[in-house]
Image (spheres, rainbow, N blue to C red):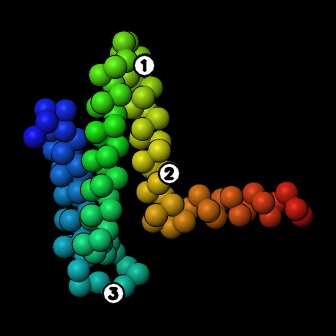
């Protein structure tokens, strides 16, 4: 494995342990209550987290200052959270629909 991919792979695995533990804990709760991730949810989030981590690691290597790397990290986190929000509940789509409705009213 490329040394650039080791940290994102470990980070992805560690982060996905949280929803795995919550899904196991809540497996007997009815649908709509608790945390219920299926296999596809884990695959999608693993791809998102690993891809973002790998892109950040690759881009951060080319930046000079610590400040620039920090800003890149904040931007990467913002993009990951926005994608997650959209995948989870359609939050970005709902916000855009609300803003379009507010303008036309």
Q: Which residue is mark 1?
A: 68
C-alpha separation, residue under disc 3 versus residue under disc 2: 28 Å
As drawn, the label of residue 30 is 3
**Marks 1 and 3, the one that precedes in the sequence:** 3
Give 61 or 35, whichever is nearer the viewer: 61
Instruction: Name which quarter of the figure residue 23 lies in.
Output: bottom left
- The quadrant of the image that shows the N terminus is top left
Q: Position of residue 61 (x, y in %)?
A: 29, 22
Q: Position of residue 38 (x, y in %)?
A: 28, 75
Q: Give the left or right position of residue 6, taking residue 91 as reference.
A: left
Residue found at x 45% / y 49%: 81
Residue found at x 35% / y 28%: 59
As drawn, the label of residue 82 is 2
C-alpha separation, residue under disc 1 versus residue under disc 3: 46 Å
Residue 46's place in the image compared with 71, above or below, is: below
C-alpha separation, residue under disc 2 versus residue under disc 1: 21 Å
């Amino acid at each position: 494995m490329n040394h650039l991919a080791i940290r994102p792979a470990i980070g992805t695995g560690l982060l996905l342990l949280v929803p795995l533990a919550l899904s196991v804990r809540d497996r007997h709760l009815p649908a709509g209550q608790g945390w219920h991730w299926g296999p596809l949810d884990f695959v999608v989030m693993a791809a998102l987290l690993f891809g973002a981590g790998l892109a950040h690691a690759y881009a951060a290597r080319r930046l000079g200052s610590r400040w620039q790397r920090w800003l890149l990290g904040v931007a990467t986190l913002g993009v990951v959270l926005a994608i997650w929000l959209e995948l989870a509940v359609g939050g970005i789509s709902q916000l855009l629909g609300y803003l379009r409705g507010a303008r036309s009213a």
